[in-house]
Image (cartoon, grey):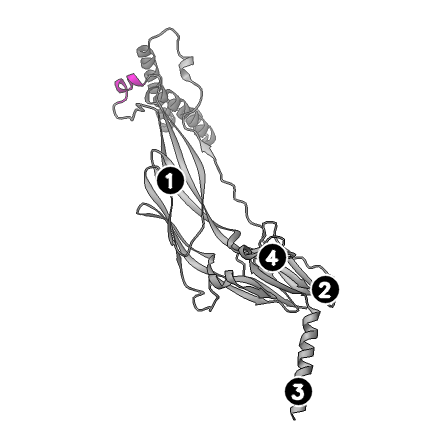
Amino acid sequence: MNRIVTKFTVVLLALTFIVGQLHAQFTTTFAKNVTPGQSNGLYYSLPQTVLRLDFIIEEAQLMKGPLSDYASNYFEMEDVVDYETTEYQLLDVKMTPLASPDPNALFFVSITTVRGGGKMQFDVLPNGIIRSVGLGNDTETEEVLVPTPIQQKPQCCHEENANGEDFVGLLSAGKTNAQLAKEVADKIAEIRKAKFYLISGDVEMASNPETFKTMYKNLDVMEKEYTSLLLGKRVTRQVVKSVYVIPNKEVPTQTVAKFSETEGLTLGTGGSGSMITVQTLSLNTTATINAPSQSAVESMSYENKVFYRVPETAQVRITCGNTILLEDRVLVDQLGAMLMAPITNTKLVFDTETGQIINIRTR
C-alpha cells in the first residue's frame, strides 16, 4: 500500500513539473521594488479615476459709455456703468470620469522561463494601462475592443450684447459732448416710438410676421447701440474652465478652487470667494471583499499572477460655499479592491477604464 502511495506521489509531482514546464513563468512585482536592468520584462499599471470638472462661467465685461456723464439727464431709472470692470457668474458644472495610470498600482512583470512553446501575451495601452494578458500557443491574434474615450472639448462660445459700430461717428461732428448726448437721447426716443408703432400695428409692413420680426430686431439693435453711448455696454461670453480631481481614500473632501463674482474661478485655496469642494464618499460596495493590503501588494512578488481591480461606487458631491452644484454616483477605481488573478492556460481581458476583468477565455 505504501509503495502504491509513493508511486502515485512521484507521478503527481512529475506531472506537476511537466505542466509547469509547458507554461511561461513570470513574476509580478511592485514597480518601486524593481532594480533597473535586473531582469527582462515590462511595466503595466491599473487605471485610477480622475474627475474632470468643467465649470461653465459667464464673463460680463462692463464698458463705460463715452457720454455717460450726461446719462442722468435723460435716464433716471436706468443703470449706468460708472467704471470698467468684469463680473463673473457660475452657470453650471459638468463632471466626466476619466482613466489615467495609477502610480500606486504600477507593476513590473519579469519573464523567467518559457518552455514547450508556451507564449505569454501582454497587451497594454500606450499609457501603460493593461488591456489583456494570456498564456498559450494560439497563433491567431484577437482584436480587443477598447472603448474610445469621448473627447469633450470645452465649448467656449460667446455672445456679445450691443457690440457693434460706434454710432458717434454717425453724428454731426464739431459738437460738444452735451450736444451729442442730447442728439443721442432724441434718437433713442425716435427709435422707441417706431418700436411702439410697430407693435401697435400702425405700420402696414408689420402685417407679415417675418417682416415684423426683422424690423423689430433692427430697431432693437439700433436702440442698444445708441443707449450704450450713455449707459455703457455689457459684453458677455461663456467660457469653460476645467479642474481635474483625483479622489483619495484618506481625504474624502478636497478643496479644489474658489469662485467669486469679481475674480471668477481660481484654482487651489488662493484667491477670494466661496470655496469649491469635491466630496467623494464610498458606498462600500466592495467592503466584503477580502483584498490584500497595500503594504502586502508593495512588499511581495507573485508568480504567475497579475493584479486587477474591482471598482467602488461612490457618491460625489460638488459644492460652492453652501450651494450644491452637482451630486451623482460614479465608479472610482482607486477606492475599490485590488486583487490577484492566476494565469494558467487562459486569457484575461481588462476594462481599461476600471481595471476590472471583464472576460476570461480558456485556451
- Mark toward the viewer: 2 or 1: 2
Mark 3 and mark 1 residues within 8 Å of each other at the beta carbon: no
Structural distance between the alpha carbons of marks 2 and 4: 18 Å
Report the number of numbered marks. 4
The 10 Å Cα crowd at callout 1, few under 14, some 14 to 19, many 20 or more, is some
Q: Which residues lie in the magenta part?
A: 68-75
Point out which mark residue 90 bears: 1
x then y, percent, for residue 72: 26, 20
Secondary structure that dominates the magenta span: helix
Dot 1 amino acid type:
Leu
x then y, percent, for residue 346: 64, 67
Residue 143 within the segment the image draws in magenta: no
Q: Is residue 349 left or right of residue 258?
A: right
Structural distance between the alpha carbons of marks 4 and 1: 39 Å
Structural distance between the alpha carbons of marks 4 and 3: 44 Å
Displayed quadrant of residue 252: bottom left
- Mark toward the viewer: 4 or 1: 4
The 10 Å Cα crowd at callout 4, few under 14, some 14 to 19, many 20 or more, is many
Point out which mark residue 6 bears: 3
Q: Secondary structure at mark 1?
A: strand
x then y, percent, for residue 266: 39, 38
**Mark 4 or 1 closer to N-term?**
1
The residue labelled by disc 2 is 138
**What residue is shown at x 43% (from left), y 35% (from top)?**
238
Structural distance between the alpha carbons of marks 2 and 1: 56 Å
Q: Secondary structure at mark 2?
A: loop
Displayed quadrant of residue 175: top left
